[in-house]
Amino acid sequence: MIPTPHIEVTDKSLFAKTVLMPGDPLRAKWVAEKYLTDVKLINTVRNMLAFTGYYKGKKVTVMGSGMGMPTIGIYSYELFKFYDVENIIRVGSCGAYTDKVNLYDVIIATSAFSESTYASTAFGYQENILKPSDELVNKLHQAAKNLNIPTVDGIIHSSDVFYRHHGNVFTDVRDKFGCIAVEMESFALFANAKYLNKNAACILTVSDSLVTNEATSAKERQESFNKMIEIALEAAIMD
Ligand code: HPA
């Protein structure tokens, strides 16, 4: 096959059916090195590193998505459409919108609200709330239960803007739509999955709080990141 504009892979079989996507490609490298065996680096275009290896004997790919809906929109579309990827689990960080969510909590998104025009521009979807795959979400819940790691379910806000200074900054979205945390990618990922009949889900760790303005320490962030990755990997290999 010919490669896509953003992924140089010419053999679909180099991608697993399930891809974990952290925002940072160096996180993808770190996950591959820590958790996978027989790892191959399969994409380096724009340094958006993708690695395929084996977790407990089952093939899994980890690839960076970049930050924001335009970028995850491109990569996840190409993975679903051209590389026959069936499942994408975003593994990311988020900022808490409520004091009911604590730093380092692991959140499983039950839906994503966004004021982004991504889904209407791309597919004519008028909804401003999109859902992940029930099946993948169930697997994430089951994996967390098996690993004995507590998780929080909730609606997340996929924002186009990180530095927001206008209006109520976040309480409007929280109070109107019930969003418990903010990130910047899931709405576009869920829109692509819906359009292409594929499965997507999102699991997040809380890295900062817009309520208290606390931020996490590097060491603790790494530990909560590991828990999230272990849940996602177990879900990825579940039948
Ligand atoms: N805003 C948007 N995305 C984020 C944040 C935030 O505060 N923290 C982690 N991802």
Image (cartoon, grey):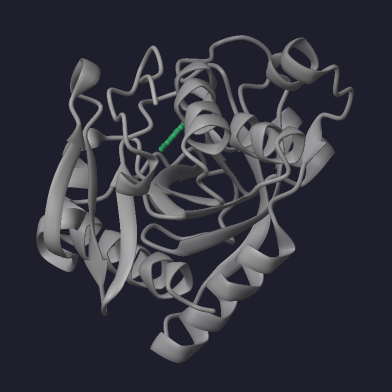
Which of the 4 image quadrants contains residue 229?
bottom left
Where 37 sits versus 95, above or below? below
Point out residue 63 in the picture as x, y percentages from the top left corner: 31, 41
In this view of the protein, can residue 8 be seen by the observer? yes
Is residue 210 found left or right of 135 in the rendered image? left
Point out residue 14 in the picture as x, y percentages from the top left corner: 30, 46
Question: Toward the viewer: 135 or 104?
Answer: 135
Point out residue 153 in the picture as x, y percentages from the top left corner: 64, 64
Where 32 sits versus 59, above or below? above
**Residue at 26% in and 79% down:** 56
User: The C terminus is located in which quarter?
Assistant: bottom right
Question: Toward the viewer: 222 or 214?
Answer: 222
Question: Toward the viewer: 193 or 69?
Answer: 193
**Residue at 49% in and 27% down:** 78
In this view of the protein, can residue 184 be seen by the observer? no
Is residue 130 found left or right of 25 in the rendered image? right
Where 88 sits versus 7, above or below? below
Point out residue 44 in the picture as x, y percentages from the top left corner: 18, 26
User: The N terminus is located in which quarter?
Assistant: top left
